[in-house]
Amino acid sequence: MAAVSIGIIMLVSALLSGVVYHHVSQQDTTRTGERPNFIVILADDMGWGDLGANQAGEKPSYTPHLDQLALEGKRFTDFHSPASTCSPSRASLLTGRYSLRNGVTHNFAVQSVSGLPLNESTFAELLQDAGYFTAMIGKWHLGHNGPYHPVNRGFDYYLGIPYSNDMGCTDTPGFDLPACPPCQGGSQQSSERGRGCYTDVALPLYENQSIIEQPLDLWSLTEKYTSAAVRILHSARERKQPFLLYVALAHMHVPLAHGGVAEGEGVYAATLREMDCLVGAIKATSDLLDKGNSLILFTGDNGPWEQKCQFAGSVGPFLGKWQTSRGGGSAKRTTWEGGHREPTVAYWPGKIPANTTSGALLSGLDIFPTLLSLAGVDPPKDRKIDGIDMTDILLGKTDTGRKNLLHPNSGAAGIYGDLQTVRVGSHKAFYLTGAATACGGGGGQAQLHDPPLIFDLSRDPEERSPLDPRSEEYQAALQAVQREREALLWDIANDNVSAADYATKLAAEPCCNHALPACRCKPLALS
């Protein structure tokens, strides 16, 4: 086992050692009643094939804790992120609405003035209003200024990075391709920025609305997050009120930073194992402090970032062969399966049947209505919600999921947010195809399709060979696809929709000391 695994286990043991007696003596008097607690864990840039339980022993597993979570809960094989890039996926997860409704169609920047539109309601806000203690750890990427900050969008407590962990320099950079230099001032800034490196502003770590470390130390971030999660879970128990903990991990987004590589492991595998240990620590703490009353949901925001080569994850069998045979990548930023099909596990002891698998078509959109339903909270009535309540699927009462799912353009081709890829049953139609940058730098051409390409994923998960447009199967699928897509677009056109402000200005970037290069400041202790 890598050194990081041992370190995290020791950390959790130390943090919990003082609360074991309290747990035993107060077990019957500190339950939160009928309302469950929620722990939502969101990985970043993780591939469907990165989860050991999804690989059926075909290769070594670096996710033993997640595999155990699946063994004691339910694994989902057809669960999808709401978009194939960061900000839109997270906005849709938190609101239960497609990006064409919530207004977040592409990523926010370091200098973004705004964020997730203020008239959109997050599940954190609604649960907070209903009496839940709410906390968030990790990547936000939905606006970091004023009313757009997490503590103003429903979270009582926040510790994390306001955007992706490559959107700022650090003193000891992690592994990336290309490699980026450490923070410093000087003339190299413009040339490094052109290579995708940020050298003019350091990566900040926030606690609530204060920057407590800039640049943060990526190599100790997992330990900070683990310690914070344990403290939050213990604090929530002491409050004797239901809680929501949303953990949006930096893993597996580059730059990768880990606590040590075990023999035979590469950098990506070591980082994956570190992420898995963090999840294991959260589960262990939850099991000890609150047996049976916490639902843990683990999923991802989008597929692997293929152009990062050895620092990117595995899409499993979802290879997007039609596209890759023509050039380019078929994962993050695309609407091919590798871009949005996510490793997903749910655990709720005594409620979710153990060691079960669901093939129901589901999405991160569905987390919003599910949490509200379980908490007994009504969703907003002045707008349409695209998610479905998946409670009965979680509890094993049915395995019937969504009738349809549309995948928004996420940067590979077309206008951001447009819904030009449609899933109905096992059939998936592309009105537009496009590729992300592949490992090695290759790209593909965007291409419109009229009539659309249609694949049967039940027979062709690789998306290699579209159906013959002359076949009866194609014609029947086309009618269903057109009907569902037109109905949704009409519904969106008549809904209460939002528009995000993507304006930027220098004064909006997080900076604790403008007088020093890269906004450097002395680290502060956590409160």
Image: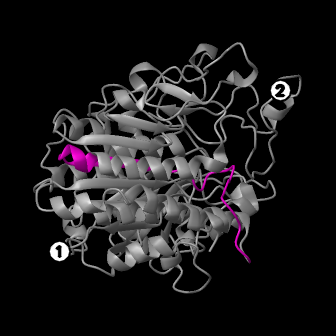
> Which residue is painted at 50% across and 75% down in the image?
64
> Which residue is painted at 58% across and 73% down in the image?
62
Q: Is residue 158 depicted above or below 508 in this figure?
A: below
> Which residue is painted at 56% across and 60% down in the image?
46
Q: Is residue 326 depicted above or below 514 in this figure?
A: below
Residue 89, x across and y down, in percent: 46, 46
**Badge 2 is on which residue?**
190
Quarter of the image containing the N terminus?
bottom right
Residue 251 part of the magenta-drawn span: yes
Asked whether residue 426 is in view, the answer is yes
> Which residue is painted at 57% across and 78% down in the image?
61
Q: Residues within 10 Å of mark 2 (few under 14, many from 20)?
A: few
Quarter of the image containing the C terminus?
top left
Q: Say what secondary structure mark 2 lies in.
A: helix
**Badge 1 is on which residue?**
397
User: Tag 1: residue type?
Assistant: Lys
Q: Main secondary structure of the magenta part?
A: loop
- Judge by depth and name the residue closer to the eye, 373 or 352: 352
Q: CA distance from mark 1 to mark 2?
A: 57 Å
46 to the left or right of 369? right
Q: Are marks 1 and 2 in contact (CB under 8 Å)?
A: no
Which quadrant of the figure has residue 120?
top left
Residue 338, x across and y down, in percent: 56, 63
Residue 431 part of the magenta-drawn span: no
Residue closest to the far right: 187
Numbered range of the magenta stretch: 236-263
Residue 454, x across and y down, in percent: 49, 66
Which numbered disc, 1 or 2, marks the residue that appears first in the sequence? 2
Q: Say what secondary structure mark 1 lies in.
A: loop
User: Tag 2: residue type?
Assistant: Ser
